[in-house]
Image (tube, rainbow, N blue to C red):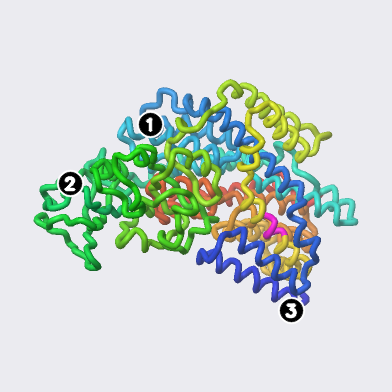
């Protein structure tokens, strides 16, 4: 086996640095991956055409069009119609899961699963609140089911489209007719051969085993202090506040349900613990830990306002126009690593951070000094139009039930369903390329006013596309430098005594491991050339290894930051990082067994 050249070592070093930066949240994934691609281009490892090849990739263009299709389904209220009938007459936690899981799985096979999960969270939260069930018992399975559903079709997730186009490119780059035939585009339902078995095993695991591993964390108000959704909030006593001159116990600040007074900041000194006879003074900053419902009660006290928004005046017309909104910080947000004061929410989003919740952690300190992390849930005080302006922001996911504040084109819902059915039909037809089908239906959604042209542009998630493009550049560097071939040779040598199925298992497990660190799209792009190199050196079917990469990249279960739907439920369900490990790792193991058994059976390693 030949040795790595300096180009190979340099490429691996750049990829390693990118991974370290991603692990330490030193920047958004799209910027880090694109930056890595630019570096390898600067030293001449890849050409300019390779650097920008991702932007012209048909799979990426298809993803952009599908963002518009999914947004139109939401704008017409089509998703809401499904959501309202989702739970039916379910009365128990298990009954709710058994009703919701198949519906979410089917929807996620054809629509962006992030939108599906965002739609379902408030519906499940309301059902849980009415029946005294902890949302943490349902929200994590909701995310997992959406991921499993996306594994079943070509358009179920953007990752499948990317792998399909990579296979087309690999087929076009070879002179071997056998290899060219073995590769080529995925059909609409080809992945169902592995996706459906994985989904069925995943559903069974979640219904009978996973639910026993789920945490049960009750809402603090309804369960008398048994809370995990604790926010840290800092309130300022203004001159006109009636609390001025009152003792803490007189003001009733020690008897608020689900809320604990941590400290008082006064003229540069901290008073903690706070005694019941402590007198409240003008300018005091009182820090509480507690639940949203009681934080709202605090804001009803005249002159007692969130310290993050000192210009706020209780009872004023401005105050009446303000809204509270919960938002989860995404893994791509530029806010990560900054404290609340540095993030400058007022200027950037026209919103103020009222409170912060972080998994099962009880936060301490001043709100302004809190360093933001991916997955933090923020309670934001916003203007009337904040939701319309930011519901598609790449910086955070809105998780409050806020449907009533945006106009919905209900009369277009049947038309949107019809156009979605047309998309599926066009995708199935071999005469129509997937990118043509996607752009045709996206265009029809705009022409028929299911979504406006402006909303269509705003719903394209550019950070996702940039992340994929950056991964394409690094994948090209792996190939061009010879690193993928040499690493592939190492895997072949390592598994030589165990056979090609063992090499397939190594590729699958490596893809799963990398998928815990970066997005599934980037994982698939980076692992694809390595998988094909292993298949070529073994002389086996390259399609088998490509399918393994697509399936393994989907297995984003053991980390909240590995997939957007996990990030959505992380804060909303009050989960801890270990919850994903405890429930997700056994599921990863089960699906690995299923994949390694089923994939070579459906796509034989030999005789292709």
Q: Main secondary structure of the magenta part?
A: helix
Magenta residue span? 468-472
Seen from the viewer's position, the closer of residues 243 and 158 is: 243
Seen from the viewer's position, the closer of residues 473 and 282 is: 282
Mark 2 vs mark 3: in front: 2
Q: Which of disc 3 and disc 2 is earlier in sequence?
A: 3
Q: Which of disc 1 and disc 2 is earlier in sequence?
A: 1
Residue 548 image point, x, y percent: 67, 51
Residue 533 image point, x, y percent: 76, 62
Mark 2 vs mark 1: in front: 2
What is the quadrant of residue 198 in the picture?
top right
Task: Please give the residue where the numbered disc 2 appears in the rendered image.
Answer: 242
Vertical placement of residue 424 versus 598, above or below: above
**On the rendered structure, is 124 left or right of 10?**
left
Residue drawn at 33 percent across, 53 percent down: 310
**Badge 2 local density, few (<14 within 10 Å), some, or many (20+)?**
some
In the picture, the disc for residue 127 is 1
The reply to whether callout 1 and callout 3 are in contact (CB within 8 Å) is no
């Amino acid at each position: 086996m030949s040795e790595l050249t300096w180009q190979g070592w340099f490429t691996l070093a750049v990829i390693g640095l990118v991974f370290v930066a991603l692990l330490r949240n030193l920047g958004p994934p799209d910027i880090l991956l694109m930056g890595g691609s630019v570096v390898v281009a600067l030293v001449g490892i890849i050409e300019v055409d390779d650097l920008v090849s991702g932007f012209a990739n048909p799979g990426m263009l298809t993803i952009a069009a599908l963002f518009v299709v999914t947004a139109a389904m939401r704008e017409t209220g089509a998703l809401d119609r499904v959501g309202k009938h989702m739970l039916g007459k379910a009365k128990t936690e298990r009954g709710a899961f058994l009703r919701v899981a198949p519906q979410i799985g089917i929807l996620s096979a054809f629509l962006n699963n992030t939108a599906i999960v965002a739609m379902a969270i408030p519906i499940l939260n309301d059902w849980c609140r009415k029946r005294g069930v902890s949302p943490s018992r349902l929200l994590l399975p909701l995310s997992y089911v959406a991921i499993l559903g996306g594994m079943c079709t070509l358009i179920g997730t953007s990752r499948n489209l990317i792998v399909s186009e990579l296979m087309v490119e690999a087929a076009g780059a070879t002179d071997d007719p056998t290899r060219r035939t073995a590769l080529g585009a995925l059909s609409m339902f080809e992945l169902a051969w592995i996706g459906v078995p994985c989904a069925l095993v995943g559903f069974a695991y979640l219904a009978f085993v996973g639910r026993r591993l789920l945490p049960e964390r009750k809402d603090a108000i309804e369960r008398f202090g048994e809370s995990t959704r604790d926010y840290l909030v800092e309130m300022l006593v203004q001159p006109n506040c009636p609390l001025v001159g009152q003792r803490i116990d007189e003001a009733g600040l020690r008897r608020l349900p689900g809320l604990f007074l941590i400290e008082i900041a006064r003229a540069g000194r901290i008073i903690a613990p706070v005694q019941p006879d402590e007198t409240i003074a003008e300018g005091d900053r009182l820090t509480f830990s507690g639940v949203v419902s009681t934080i709202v009660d605090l804001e009803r006290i005249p002159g007692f306002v969130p310290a993050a928004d000192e210009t706020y005046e209780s009872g004023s017309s401005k105050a009446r126009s303000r809204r509270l909104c919960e938002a989860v910080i995404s893994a791509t947000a530029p806010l990560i690593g900054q404290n609340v004061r540095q993030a400058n929410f007022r200027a950037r989003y026209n919103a103020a951070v009222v409170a912060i919740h972080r998994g099962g952690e009880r936060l301490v300190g001043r709100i302004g000094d809190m360093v933001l992390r991916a997955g933090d849930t923020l309670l934001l005080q916003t203007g009337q139009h904040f939701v319309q302006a930011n519901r598609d922001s790449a910086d955070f996911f809105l998780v409050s039930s806020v449907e009533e504040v945006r106009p919905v084109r209900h009369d277009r819902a049947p038309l949107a369903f019809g156009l979605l059915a047309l998309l599926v039909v066009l995708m199935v037809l071999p005469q129509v390329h997937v990118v043509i089908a996607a752009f045709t239906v996206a265009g029809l959604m705009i022409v028929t006013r299911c979504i406006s042209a402006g909303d269509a542009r705003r719903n394209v998630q550019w950070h996702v596309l940039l992340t994929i493009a950056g991964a394409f550049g690094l994948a090209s560097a792996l190939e061009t430098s010879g690193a993928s071939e040499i690493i592939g040779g190492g895997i072949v040598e390592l598994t030589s005594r165990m056979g090609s199925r063992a090499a397939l298992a190594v590729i699958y497990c490596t893809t799963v491991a990398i998928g815990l660190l970066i997005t599934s799209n980037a994982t698939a792009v980076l692992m694809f050339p390595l998988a094909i190199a292993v298949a070529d050196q073994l002389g086996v079917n390259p399609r088998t290894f490509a399918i393994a990469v697509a399936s393994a990249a989907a297995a984003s279960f053991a980390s909240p930051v590995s997939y957007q739907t996990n990030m959505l439920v992380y804060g909303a369900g009050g989960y801890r990082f270990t919850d994903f490990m405890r429930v997700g790792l056994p599921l990863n193991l089960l699906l690995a067994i299923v994949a390694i058994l089923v994939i070579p059976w459906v796509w034989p390693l030999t005789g292709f």
